Amino acid sequence: MEAQEARLVLPRFTYEDAWTLGTLLVGMAREREAPVAIDIRRGPQQLFHCALPGSSADNDAWIDRKRRVVERYGSSSFLVGARFRAKGTTFEASSRLDPDRYAAHGGSFPVAVEGVGVIGSVTVSGLPQAEDHALVVEALERLLGSHTAASG
């Protein structure tokens, strides 16, 4: 997971990129008939949000909780949870953060820009956590590939 974060650094992240990433995620989720909600932010500003059939307000609450982990730690919510488990504990037991506000479950990933660092997050909720994480990673890989192709 650390290698994913090191690799998935974008050359830029504009409003148009947020739209492209969001619509890419919607298309991927629809192909898989995934009942997810999707959220993309740059800082505190929500640039994209979509709730697909089968998702609920609970998914929006999960998005907020997972996103806060990315904002606080600068790493994916899945990686943060894995780091706590690797220490023989859980995020809920050892982070000292309110579990009603923070969730180190897969699905939220930092949006990082070359030369800048983490500037936002992209979050999916509605699938098992490993699948939420994988969907986001696949979409970011596609977006990065399109940036590379455009500049290459």
Image (tube, grey):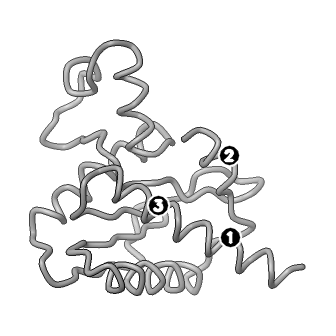
Quarter of the image that includes the C terminus: bottom right
Q: Residue 29 appears at what percent x and percent y?
A: 34, 78
| Front of the two marks 1 and 3 | 1
What type is the residue that disc 1 sits on? Answer: Leu
Question: Is mark 1 in CB contact (under 8 Å) with mark 3?
Answer: no
Q: Residue 41 appears at what percent x and percent y?
A: 43, 67
Relative to 138, residue 146 above or below: below
Query: Element under label 1?
Result: helix
What type is the residue that disc 2 sits on? Answer: Ala
In this view, the residue farthest toward the right is 152
Relative to 73, residue 18 above or below: below
Q: Relative to residue 145, is residue 82 drawn left or right? A: left
Picture quadrant where residue 132 is located: bottom left
Within 10 Å of disc 3 (Cα), the crowding (few <14, some 14-19, many 20+) is: few
Within 10 Å of disc 1 (Cα), the crowding (few <14, some 14-19, many 20+) is: some
Rendered residue at 9%/69% (across/down) = 57
What type is the residue that disc 3 sits on? Answer: Gly
Q: Which residue is mark 3?
A: 43
Question: Is mark 2 in CB contact (under 8 Å) with mark 1?
Answer: no
| Front of the two marks 3 and 2 | 2
Give the distance between the C-alpha atoms of the residues marked 3 and 2, in whole angstroms: 20 Å
**First reached walking from the N terminus: tag 2 or tag 1:** 2
Rendered residue at 44%/80% (across/down) = 22
Picture quadrant where residue 23 is located: bottom left
Relative to 75, residue 96 above or below: above
Q: Residue 13 appears at what percent x and percent y?
A: 63, 72
Which of 63 and 41 lies nearest the eye of the viewer?
A: 63
Q: Which residue is mark 2?
A: 6
Q: Which mark is residue 144?
A: 1
Query: Element under label 3?
Result: loop
Give the distance between the C-alpha atoms of the residues marked 2 and 1, in whole angstroms: 12 Å
